[in-house]
Image (cartoon, rainbow, N blue to C red):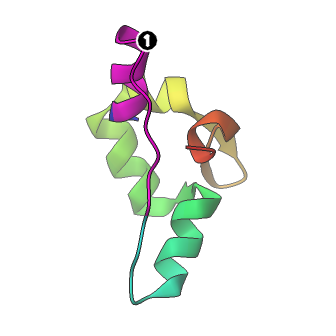
Amino acid sequence: MLCSEFAERHRGFRFAIQATDIDTGVLATAAAGYYEGRSAERFGASRPELVRKYFRSEGAGIRAIPELRAT
């Protein structure tokens, strides 16, 4: 989200995110971009403007918009 915010202000900025972790479940969760429970609540409380911009309600949680997951 921070890179996307920066890219909006600096049109020539390009980025890609590469992720590694020994726990492939963590990577699958990040790729799906779906968060619920305390994770969603904490994030929503700390950065509500980013949640409104980059996430949509889905089921019992929130999911990152496709444009964000594509980066």
Rendered residue at 41%/75% (across/down): 20
Q: Is residue 71 above or below residue 67?
A: below
Q: Is residue 59 above or below residue 2?
A: below
The secondary element bearing badge 1 is classed as loop
Q: Residue furthest front?
A: 12
Answer with left or right where residue 26 lies relative to residue 58.
Answer: left
Residue corresponding to mark 1: 11
Task: Pinpoint residue 12: horizontal percent, then vertical percent.
Answer: 42, 16
Task: Pinpoint residue 18: horizontal percent, then vertical percent.
Answer: 44, 60
Viewer-side residue, 40 vs 26? 26
- Which residue type does callout 1 highlight? Arg
Q: Is residue 45 above or below residue 53?
A: below
Viewer-side residue, 12 vs 27? 12
Rendered residue at 38%/28% (across/down): 48
Q: Is residue 19 above or below residue 7?
A: below
Q: Residue furthest left?
A: 46
Answer with left or right where residue 43 lies relative to residue 55.
Answer: left
Task: Pinpoint residue 27: horizontal percent, then vertical percent.
Answer: 51, 73
Magenta range is: 3-18
